[in-house]
Amino acid sequence: MGWRLEAWNPDYALPQVGFEESQVALEVDTEIEEWSPKPLRSCEWPLLYFVDGRQRIDAVIASETGQRALLVTVAAGALVRDDGGIRLAGPPRICRYALHTGGFDAEIRVGKEFVYEPLQVTAADLRELAGKVNGVMRRLEAQLAGELEGGVVVVDGPIYQGEQPIQRPMLGYAKTMWQQYLPPEKASILLDLEVHHRTPLFRIHKGERRKLDLYSWYLRLPLDPSTPFHAGAGLIRMETHAQTSPEAIALADQMAYLFGRLASSPSRDPRAPQNLIPIGGLEAWLGRYMGQGQVIRRTIVRELFR
């Protein structure tokens, strides 16, 4: 048989596909380490934080003059992993905004509980306005990450440069592989990686879409059973803003050891193995604090009948 499954459930995998964005990224330096797979090395567990966020569009509203706005809820939270195990690092951050391009200057109250603060952004249409929600969530994540003390911060997704410079060890990881960062002669190593092995580091230089110089690498997570799935199903791409290559190499070895023990299983998570167990738990926890979308929408409709 010449084909294999994607590990993710199609409900999650298909919205991620964007073949027009799959060109090889520019300004990548692959001369940092010898270009061969790097085996697993046993490492100490550091003080580790996991930061993640969630977002939801609760409603699309319009003013009397036809100007549109999005009522959105964004959330961010953190888990800490230390000698005592994994636990919450504090209460979640929940923010509600009326995202608009003009014409909505006052807060919008829905019942007694939900207050949407006006937030003006630049967008040409509703689709572009909806695309701004992710940036609002990422800024909230960055703010939370900057307030954590000590340890290494792991964020779900690429590292986001917030309003303040990053002053601590931080690592981001991409669960999907639709962007190619390696030229073809280097990318062949991905199919040769064994479980828990990583690629050599490569350098992604900042540009129009990237505001930071980053070290990056790929890691193969355990996937059990692995037989039905294609060779790239267990890959994640990791990145760090470390200042020197020795610092980045040490972090890459450490995270290869830790992430393999936190990978999720296809029997329990539709985005396994990349949706790490702590991240999946954090997402569920944040969802409870955001409130149920259907309940909020019914509250909005009921408010309009007053």
Image: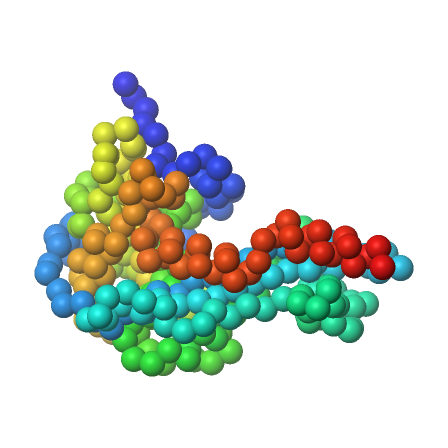
Residue drawn at (60%, 61%), measured in percent from left and top? 73
Residue 154 in view, yes or no: yes
Residue 242 in view, yes or no: no
Decide if residue 106 is on the left or right side of residue 54. Answer: right
Decide if residue 89 is on the left or right side of residue 217. Answer: right
Instruction: State the image coordinates of residue 199 (x, y, percent, origin top left).
Output: 22, 52
Single out the residue that lies furthest toward the right.
Answer: 65
Instruction: State the image coordinates of residue 45 (x, y, percent, origin top left).
Output: 18, 67
Rendered image coloring scheme:
rainbow
Instruction: State the image coordinates of residue 24 (x, y, percent, origin top left).
Output: 40, 48
Single out the residue that lies furthest toward the top.
Answer: 1
Residue drawn at (78%, 73%), measured in percent from left and top? 105
Compare residues 183 and 215 and report the one nearer the observer.
Answer: 215
Q: Where does the C terminus fall, quadrant-wise? A: bottom right
Relative to 126, say whether 107 is above or below.
below
Q: Where does the N terminus fall, quadrant-wise? A: top left
Residue drawn at (84%, 55%), measured in percent from left and top? 305
Residue drawn at (45%, 72%), measured in percent from left and top? 91
Compare residues 54 and 242 and report the one nearer the observer.
Answer: 54
